[in-house]
């Protein structure tokens, strides 16, 4: 990004999300109307039965799992609504119109809960606060400069390395609505992405979903509700709530507000890039584009996949433990590390005052909602480079019920294209490469590919000669550059193998209580095979898998892994 680049819309009050928030009450009413139409379009559902089931599940939720953020009148509201529904059911001559007040009240309550707000003043405060916060996280303290612990804003922004068609994405904001669909690894993803978009790519803020449970903490709830979030309550599974949530996404896109949601649904527990994504919210982008076409609005919807890469994930231990528990069940025993508060504080301070690592964001190629790539002017392009008229995708449909079936096909295709872009946009960084090679070598030396069997080994007995990793790094980096020039490599991989290892280990899992890898007497060792496995999974690359499976690569594995 050029130093001369400015924000595409300088005044926060002129951002689409600001104008959207200024009409929140009107939007809630429109969301109610739109969702009612969606619910009634489900012809296979009987409305009285659907209402009855929804109220039943809400009462069950209240009884089984109450949150601090839940309204004080929650139980009273649903009991009253149940009585109203019972009175309608008691009328043998009741028509669909008689059930509408119950449906309207239910959807209106959901809409009021889901729709957040955006306050420009809060955003400007957050911009300053996050600059202060991230300067502390991403800059180091040293004895030579003991008073320069905060660094500068410029040095902070240098820590955020960007790849991909950044200028093209900026330009597309003038052509339509941009919907970001990132990978998801950390609870900090939304905050970091928002900060990077604002300060590096310099584009307006977006609306995005945040778990309602986050609002249980008042200070967090206060700020995120004013930064463009809409609330998502994963306890609610009934169709009426889900349709209201999806309609929130659809209508905001229709109204020109750029969006962000994680199509994986939740953080990657294994550390791997998502190879399966949820299609519910993704379908809202197709629905929004169809509405725009049907109503002759001058707007396009652009999908931008992006991949985030960090040399450390704060909650890596929690995530990988959850993944192994689900996959292994009785084969996996999770014993929490017994660390004293003093050691935990020391680990945190060590990370805070020595970390100078970078984080990486890689934009994939922008697409339309059908998975076609778009050019700089937002035109959809086919495989031969010809411009496509996207209105043809929605032609020939007379019955609204048929929209659902056709759009489901479009959404599935879009999901596959997003996953494809994830793997094309993955940036290989030093920390992940070293973890990948160390775990692979250790697994091969044990002649064991089952992670649950490897976890049974005593970590003190795992020792990998450093020279082995150096040889493997040299081989793989050379093969990638020569045979796979399309693969994105961080700049540190242009250095010597020794420097790559030094750089990678400096930041690998720096905030985690146990070390995934460390050096002792020219040997690579680990304090946690589990964490090593997690960071190994972070490197999702079919190209590297192919290289490590080659005969030439096998020849350099003559160094013996020593396991006492």
Image: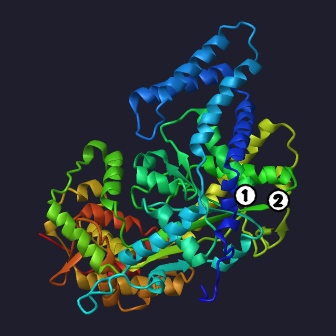
**For numbered disc 2, what is the local secondary structure?**
helix
Q: Position of residue 91 (x, y in %)?
A: 70, 8
**For numbered disc 1, what is the local secondary structure?**
loop
Could you say which is closer to the camera, residue 270 or residue 352? 352
- The disc, 1 or 2, on the residue closer to the chain's N-terminal end is 1
Q: Position of residue 246 (x, y in %)?
A: 64, 45
Q: Which mark is residue 173?
A: none
Could you say which is closer to the camera, residue 428 or residue 135? 135
Check disc 2: other Cα within 10 Å, few if <14, some if 14-19, many if 20+.
Answer: some
* Mark pair 1, 2: CA separation: 9 Å
Check disc 1: other Cα within 10 Å, few if <14, some if 14-19, many if 20+.
Answer: many
Q: Which mark is residue 390?
A: 2
Q: Is residue 51 left or right of residue 162?
A: right
Q: How many marks?
A: 2
Q: Residue at x 44, y 49 (%)?
A: 214
Question: Is residue 124 visible from the viewing direction of this image?
Answer: yes
Among the 4 quarters of the image, the one containing residue 104: top right
Q: Residue at x 27, y 82 (%)?
A: 468
Q: Quadrant of the C terminus?
A: bottom left
Among the 4 quarters of the image, the one containing residue 87: top right
Q: Taking 4 as reference, is 274 above or below it? A: above
Q: Is residue 285 left or right of residue 529?
A: right
The residue that disc 1 covers is 370
Q: Residue at x 83, y 50 (%)?
A: 394
Could you say which is closer to the camera, residue 204 or residue 307? 204
Q: Position of residue 278 (x, y in %)?
A: 56, 49
Q: Are marks 1 and 2 in contact (CB under 8 Å)?
A: yes
Q: Residue at x 29, y 87 (%)?
A: 147
Q: Position of residue 322 (x, y in %)?
A: 34, 50
């Amino acid at each position: 990004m050029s130093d001369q680049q400015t924000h595409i819309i300088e005044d926060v009050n002129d951002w689409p999300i600001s104008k959207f928030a200024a009409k929140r009450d009107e939007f809630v009413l429109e969301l109610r109307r739109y969702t009612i139409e969606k619910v009634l379009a489900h012809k296979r559902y009987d409305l009285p039965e659907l209402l009855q089931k929804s109220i039943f599940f809400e009462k069950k939720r209240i009884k089984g799992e109450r949150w601090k953020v839940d309204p004080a009148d929650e139980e009273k509201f649903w009991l009253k609504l149940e009585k109203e529904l019972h009175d309608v059911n008691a009328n043998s001559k009741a028509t669909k119109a008689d059930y509408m007040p119950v449906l309207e009240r239910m959807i209106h309550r959901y809409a009021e809960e889901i729709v957040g707000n955006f306050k420009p003043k809060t955003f400007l405060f957050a911009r300053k606060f996050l600059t202060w916060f991230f300067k502390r996280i991403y800059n180091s303290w040293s004895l030579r400069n003991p008073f320069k612990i905060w660094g500068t804003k410029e040095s902070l922004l240098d820590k955020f390395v960007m790849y991909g068609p950044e200028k093209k994405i900026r330009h597309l904001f003038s052509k339509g609505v941009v919907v970001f669909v990132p990978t998801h690894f950390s609870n900090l993803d939304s905050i970091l992405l928002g900060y990077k978009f604002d300060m590096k790519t310099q584009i307006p803020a977006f609306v995005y979903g945040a778990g309602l449970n986050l609002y249980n903490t008042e200070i967090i709830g206060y700020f995120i509700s004013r930064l463009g979030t809409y609330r998502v309550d994963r306890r609610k599974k009934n169709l009426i709530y889900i349709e209201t949530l999806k309609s929130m996404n659809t209508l905001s896109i229709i109204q020109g507000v750029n969006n962000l949601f994680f199509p994986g649904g939740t953080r990657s527990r294994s550390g791997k890039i998502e190879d399966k994504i949820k299609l519910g919210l993704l379908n809202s982008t197709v629905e929004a584009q169809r509405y725009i076409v049907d109503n002759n609005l001058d707007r396009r919807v652009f999908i931008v996949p992006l991949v985030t890469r960090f040399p450390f994930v704060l909650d890596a231990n929690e995530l990988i433990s959850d993944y192994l528990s689900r996959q292994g069940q009785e084969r996996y025993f999770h014993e929490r590390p017994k660390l004293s508060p003093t050691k935990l504080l020391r680990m945190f301070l060590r990370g805070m005052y020595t970390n100078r690592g970078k984080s990486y964001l890689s934009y994939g190629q922008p697409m339309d909602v059908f998975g076609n790539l778009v050019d700089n002017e937002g035109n959809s392009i086919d495989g031969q480079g010809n411009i496509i008229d996207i209105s043809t995708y929605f032609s020939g449909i007379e019955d609204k019920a048929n929209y659902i079936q056709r759009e489901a096909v479009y959404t599935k295709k879009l999901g596959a294209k997003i996953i494809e872009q994830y793997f094309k946009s993955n940036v290989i960084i030093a920390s992940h490469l070293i973890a990948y090679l160390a775990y692979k070598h250790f697994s091969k030396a044990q002649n064991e590919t089952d992670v649950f069997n490897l976890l049974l080994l005593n970590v003190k007995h795992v020792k990998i000669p450093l020279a082995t990793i150096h040889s493997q790094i040299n081989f793989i980096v050379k093969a990638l550059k020569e045979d796979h020039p399309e693969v994105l490599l961080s700049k540190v991989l242009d250095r010597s193998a020794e420097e790559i290892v030094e750089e990678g280990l400096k930041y690998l899992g720096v905030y985690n209580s146990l070390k995934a890898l460390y050096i002792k007497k020219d040997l690579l060792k680990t304090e946690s095979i589990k964490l090593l496995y997690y960071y190994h999974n972070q490197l999702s690359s079919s190209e590297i898998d192919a290289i490590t499976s080659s005969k030439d690569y096998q020849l350099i594995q003559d160094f013996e892994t020593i396991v006492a």
